[in-house]
Amino acid sequence: MSDGKAIEVEGKIVAVLPGTMFKVQLSNGHTVLAHISGKLRKNFIKIAAGDNVKMEMSPYDLDKARITYRMKDERPAGTRAPMRRRY
């Protein structure tokens, strides 16, 4: 926000809704409706269910948020699920 009074929180994507909207669950169990910011939209950052994200919320409306950052996975980059053999 322009006045610098945004609340920055982290959450986990629960559901993907149409129109780049997401249901996000915060660590305290509260669920909010969020949309992606312009930078994520411009750079084609894909967000799926189960991703951890960082959001900005207005202190005036705590039911809506703007996703500003998609967190990296906890798994190291070299570990992948084993591939099935194709005969």
Image (cartoon, helix red, strand yellow):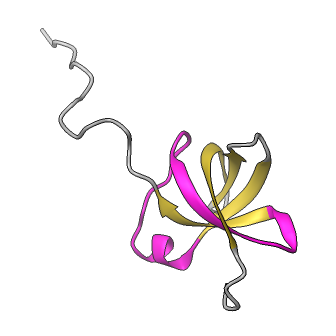
36 left or right of 45 in image: right
Is the residue 74 above or below the residue 1 in the image?
A: above
64 left or right of 45 in image: right
User: Looking at the image, which residue sits at the far right?
Assistant: 60
- Estimate the x, y position of residue 47 in percent, counting from the top left: 50, 53
- Estimate the x, y position of residue 74 in percent, counting from the top left: 37, 39
Image quarter hosting the N terminus = bottom right
Image point 70% across, 91% down: which residue?
Answer: 3
Number of numbered callouts drawn: 0
Is the residue 37 above or below the residue 30 in the image?
A: below
Corner quadrant of residue 44: bottom left
In magenta segment, residue 35: no
Image point 12% across, 8% down: which residue?
Answer: 87
In magenta segment, residue 55: yes
User: Looking at the image, which residue sits at the far left?
Assistant: 87
58 left or right of 49 in image: right
Image point 69% across, 61% down: which residue?
Answer: 34
Corner quadrant of residue 49: top right
Is the residue 6 above or below the residue 11 in the image?
A: below
55 left or right of 73 in image: right
Q: Find the magenta span and give its range.
A: 37-63
**Camera-nearest residue between 42 and 86:** 42
Is the residue 20 above or below the residue 4 in the image?
A: above
- Estimate the x, y position of residue 7 in percent, counting from the top left: 70, 69
User: Looking at the image, which residue sits at the far top?
Assistant: 87
**Camera-nearest residue between 28 and 25:** 28
Image point 42% across, 63% down: which residue?
Answer: 45
